[in-house]
């Protein structure tokens, strides 16, 4: 699947983030370092947002793609350049190795960089 994001003035994007999965955080929560949150224009500790996963730019902009409600938390305990999720969320996001987050207003898009053509990065089979 190919992804092309058409950025507008209201969209902010992070650099590539490594995905770490574990027991924390609970529920539909994505945890990032505050410096990565700053890239998205996030200044508060917690945000309730619509989370889109690997949809096209048009569906994201028009909010017509599949999404779920979730939380974005910023925590200094989260290493810079990483996205922390629990195992259930990790599977829901199709077990990505690296992602970029794109934010616009009250919604966020997770782009799975593993799915991009020519990336050459895959998660080892288990």
Image (spheres, grey):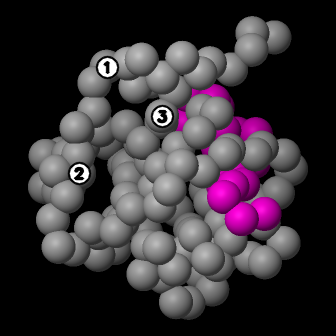
| Distance of label 3 from label 1 (alpha carbons) | 11 Å
| Label disc, if present, on residue 34 of the rendered structure | none
Image quadrant in which you'd find residue 107 = bottom left
**Visible in this render: residue 92?**
no
Label 1 crowd (10 A; few <14 / some 14-19 / many >=20): few
Q: Pinpoint residue 40: horizontal percent, then vertical percent.
A: 43, 73
Q: Which residue is mark 3?
A: 113
Query: Does the residue at mark 3 contact the one at mark 2 (Cβ under 8 Å)?
Result: no
| Horizontal arrangement in the rendering, residue 105 relative to residue 101 (left or right) | left
In terms of sequence position, does the residue under pointer 3 or pointer 2 come before the other?
2
* Near-viewer residue (64 or 1): 1
Residue at figure coordinates x 38%, y 53% from the top left: 109
Q: Position of residue 39 (x, y in %)?
A: 47, 73
Q: Secondary structure at mark 3?
A: helix
Image mark for residue 60: 2
Q: Is residue 90 magenta?
A: yes
Residue 74, position as x, y percentages in the image: 66, 76
- Residue range in magenta is 79-95
SS assignment at label 1: loop
């Amino acid at each position: 699947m190919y992804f092309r994001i058409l950025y507008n003035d209201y969209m902010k994007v992070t650099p590539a983030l490594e995905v770490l999965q574990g027991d924390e955080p609970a529920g539909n929560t994505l945890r990032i370092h505050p410096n990565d949150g700053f890239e998205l224009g996030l200044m508060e500790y917690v945000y309730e947002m619509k989370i889109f996963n690997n949809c096209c730019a048009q569906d994201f902009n028009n909010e017509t793609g599949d999404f779920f409600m979730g939380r974005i938390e910023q925590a200094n305990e989260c290493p810079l350049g990483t996205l922390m999720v629990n195992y259930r969320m990790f599977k829901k996001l199709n077990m990505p190795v690296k992602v970029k987050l794109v934010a616009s207003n009250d919604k966020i898009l997770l782009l799975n960089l593993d799915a991009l053509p020519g990336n050459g990065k895959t998660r080892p089979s288990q």
